[in-house]
Image (cartoon, rainbow, N blue to C red):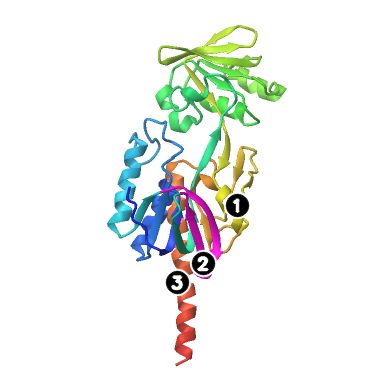
Amino acid sequence: MTDELKDRYDVVVIGGGAAGLNGALMLARARRSVAVIDAGEPRNAPAAGVHGLLGREGMPPSELLELGRAEVRQYGGHVVSGTVGGAKRSEEGFTVSIGDGREVAARRLLVTTGLVDRLPEIEGLRERWGKDVVHCPYCHGWEVRDQAIGVVATGPMSVHGALLFRQWTADLVLFTHDQPRPSAEELEKLEARGVRIVDGVIERVEVEGDRIAGVRLASGELVERAVLAAGSRMEARAGFLEDLGLTPVEHASGMGVHLNADPFGRTDVEGVWAAGNVTDLAAQVGNAAAAGAMAGAQINADLVTEETAAAIEAYRAK
């Protein structure tokens, strides 16, 4: 990281993950002045490696981000440590306030702050997150293949999740926990695939050494498992945008809250784009990076349109 920060930029990118860095890369290559303000809290920090990303399979997330920062800097972009506390309209576009008291002006904003995972309130679950508590079969399924997996029901997508994880193991349990029991149709699917159903509220996750040993139910029963899969409620990190009138809304899937944005990243607030998990809750690293690149290109095109209109006005005034 660097603390170098000018007073103003064409674009300030808020968030230094895959979406933010790829957006900044596109903008820097388009000869735009751009700064990435990164709080250093990537969602995938607990994970040992990034998966499903062509050419970078298994790379530790920290290494991937360091490569991205270097590439942005290669084209003159700045990557700055800091937490954004707010953003307001200004004559130049926007003023972004950083927690340490600094302010920076920007003509456009790209918001790529990601999301926070809210896990079920089960003792011991959070501590194993990113290790042997996982959430995405495509991200972690290969690494936990053929192990005794337990899927903790957290919402309407849990049965679907259990059927997906069945692709990676034949030893699978669905814990209904505090959720309604699956419907008759869902039960038939689970039973046909050999998925065992365990009813009852989970009291805690049992750990032996540095491994999950199983799940202790409120009844006292211990169900042995080596891995747990638990879907989280995903909440966009976007509270700092309230002064701009941009607030997260409930996602149609019921998985959490996100910022509304069109397929190109444009939000409901003129001059503000969003990309990555802050708007697409299910995006993996590759999807987030691609969305950042798209948003970066769209922002540059928007600035070109503005500058061309100004040039025409000046040309006609001659």
Residue position marked by numbered label 3 in the rendering: 304
Residue 82 against residue 126 in the figure, above or below? below
- Range of residues picked out in magenta: 82-99
Residue 141, x across and y down, in percent? 45, 27
Name the residue at 64% across, 29% down: 155
Residue 247, x across and y down, in percent? 62, 51
Disc 1 from disc 2: Cα separation:
20 Å
Would you say the residues marked 1 and 3 are in contact, meaning their CB atoms lie under 8 Å apart? no
Residue position marked by numbered label 2 in the rendering: 93
Residue type pointed to by label 3: Val
18 lies left or right of 177: left
Residue type pointed to by label 1: Asn
Q: Nearer the viewer, residue 74 or 151?
A: 74
Residue 267, x across and y down, in percent? 57, 57
Which secondary structure, mark 2?
A: strand
195 lies left or right of 45: right
Residue 253 against residue 174 in the figure, above or below? below
Residue position marked by numbered label 1 in the rendering: 260
* Dominant secondary-structure state across the stretch colored magenta: strand
